Amino acid sequence: MLSEVTQNWLHMLSVYGWIWIIPVVERLIPIRHQKFIRPGMLNDVVHTYNPVQVHSMINAALYTWLIIYAQENAGQGPYLRGSLANLPLISSFISLFLVSQLTYYITHYCSHKIPLLWQIHRVHHSSSNLDSLSTSRFHVLDQALFAAPYMMMITYFQPEPGMALLYFAFRDFWGRALHGNIRTPHWLGYIMTTPTFHRWHHSNNPEAIDKNFGAEFNFLDYLFGTVYYPKGKTPENFGEGNYSNNIVIQNFRPIYDIYNLIKYGGFIALFRKPKLLQESERNVVANVKQQ
């Protein structure tokens, strides 16, 4: 069990520490030299520290419901509920790690493949300048969507709370680091989701579209064939230059885009890309391979 002091320090690092430590590392060992002050930087800081954290309210409501449900159904329910509560720490950590990697991969994959979810997740991919500060650029619903599987997992499997907090502190740190402009050895990208590995996920390179979905470790990308990690190359173009850097517009534009999906493609367009669009994407990739 982690002491209360340790838990408070981990919380402070998650909320305030990583965001200021990692930009220093970016200046010392960058993948490529880029300006620290860049368009959209203030917006991304506001995303991190704005006082109206709507996604936290959504998460709190979900977590409260999960806790009440768990209390009312103690000792009852589906297979494996509470299965991590009495396991040895090592076994519990491995189980927590594997389940968290899988839930993140599935959530991330669906956020790209389902048009309804993509219009929301698109906000995170809109930044044309990728660095650690752009990590926080998320639509409020997208943040809640990514957090929900973790909360449901904790409530259902009930691992030791201190170990779960330690793991999530690492996840917060690495999530910000892998968006950073930080040079790492190429071989490390075959094991972990490094900054270079994840930059391909954000790049506009046609061959890298909808690739590299993994969380802190990327073995699921290699397992399911969703990896793009060429040696000796680094991505250079990211995001959408015409996407607004205003946090208010970023949270309301997806609603407008979803409305247009329904207007021009019907409700089915929310869940499946039109065949013409899929064919167009395949042609783009084919043309690039021929060049």
Image: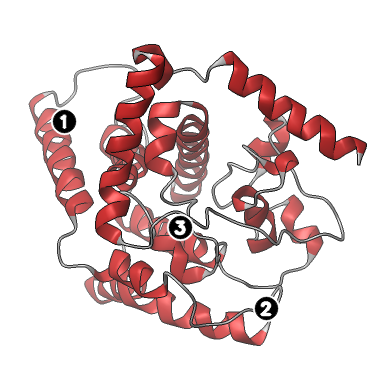
| Residue at the image position 17 percent from the left and 34 percent from the top | 66
Compared across the picture, whether 183 is left or right of 65 comes to right
Mark toward the viewer: 3 or 2: 2
Is the residue 205 above or below the residue 237 in the image? above
Q: Residue 171 has which mark?
A: 3
Q: Residue 70 has which mark?
A: 1
| Residue at the image position 47 percent from the left and 40 percent from the top | 104
> Residue 275's x, y, as percent?
59, 14
In three-dimensional space, the C-alpha distance between marks 1 and 2, rounded to whole angstroms, equals 46 Å
Residue annotated with mark 2: 30
Q: Secondary structure at mark 2?
A: loop
Residue 276 visible from this viewpoint: yes
All told, the count of numbered labels is 3
Q: Quadrant of the C terminus?
A: top right
Q: Secondary structure at mark 1?
A: helix
Q: Earlier in the sequence, mark 1 or mark 3?
A: 1
> Residue 281's x, y, as percent?
68, 29
Q: Are marks 1 and 2 in contact (CB under 8 Å)?
A: no
Q: Earlier in the sequence, mark 1 or mark 2?
A: 2
Q: Earlier in the sequence, mark 3 or mark 2?
A: 2
Residue type at mark 1 is Ala
Mark toward the viewer: 1 or 3: 3
Dot 2: within a 10 Å radius of its alpha carbon, few (fewer than 14), some, or many (20 or more) residues? some
Residue 152 visible from this viewpoint: no
